[in-house]
Amino acid sequence: MKKTAFTIIELMIVVSIIAFLATISIPRYFNYYAKAKQAEVSVNLASLHTAQEAYFAEHGEYCKNLSGPNGIGWKPQGYKNGGKNENFYYTYGFNFEGAQEGINYFTGKLGATKDNLGNTFVNKTSFMACAAGDITGKNKIDLWQIDQDRNLKNIQNGIE
């Protein structure tokens, strides 16, 4: 009776092939995962824009308060005071001196600070809101902005 089995060389070749395929596919997987996180930005910034336009139609000016008293009534869905327990990844809103969490900006799961939002502004006739997040975990901020004309731009790509 003849017994057959794999040799140690054959097993090592299979393991090295699997390791090679993993080194190729894992970085691509993380890129796709990061791009999926970016999909959140366009939805949330578009809804922020819509809320600003509704406020403008009623009051004749844009508002720096996204939520709270005299605000436009906008916050990311499921907002729970900001931070790691949120259902959204990016930090959204306006960066100016005295800006408050939950009123002028909302901190997402990635924990970007309001300072990461860059140069944002609100005046009577125009605004620019931003979204920021370190989606790859490499301390490179992915930064998006939207203005009163609904121009949505990725001004700093945090994936590459």
Image (spheres, rainbow, N blue to C red):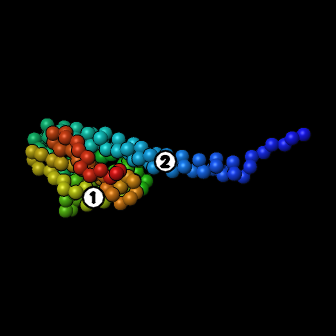
Can you tell which mark lies on residue 24? 2
When the figure is inspected, residue 54 is found, relative to residue 116, above or below; the finding is: above
Q: Residue at x 69, y 51 (%)?
A: 9
From the top left corner, tell me how far across and down residue 94 is, in percent.
Answer: 22, 53
Mark 1 touching mark 2, by CB under 8 A?
A: no
Which residue sits furthest right?
1
Between the residue at mark 1 and the residue at mark 2, the CA separation in whole angstroms equals 32 Å
When the figure is inspected, residue 50 is found, relative to residue 104, above or below; the finding is: above
**Pick the front one: 98 or 112:** 112
From the top left corner, tell me how far across and down residue 124 is, in percent.
Answer: 9, 47
Can you tell which mark lies on residue 17? none
Q: Residue at x 54, y 46 (%)?
A: 21
Q: Which mark's residue is nearer the viewer, 1 or 2?
A: 2
Q: Earlier in the sequence, mark 1 or mark 2?
A: 2
From the top left corner, tell me how far across and down residue 18 is, in percent.
Answer: 59, 47
Q: Dot 1, how many residues are within 10 Å of its Cα: few (below 14), some (14-19), or many (20+)? A: some
| Label 1 secondary element | helix
**Pick the front one: 157 or 10:** 10
**100 left or right of 4?**
left
Q: Dot 2, how many residues are within 10 Å of its Cα: few (below 14), some (14-19), or many (20+)? A: few
**49 left or right of 30?**
left
Residue 42 seen in render: yes
Q: Residue at x 18, y 51 (%)?
A: 64
Can you tell which mark lies on residue 116? 1
Q: Residue at x 40, y 57 (%)?
A: 137
| Label 2 secondary element | helix
From the top left corner, tell me how far across and down residue 120 is, in percent.
Answer: 19, 53
Q: Amino acid at mark 2?
A: Ile
**Pick the front one: 96 or 147:** 147
Q: Quadrant of the N terminus?
A: top right
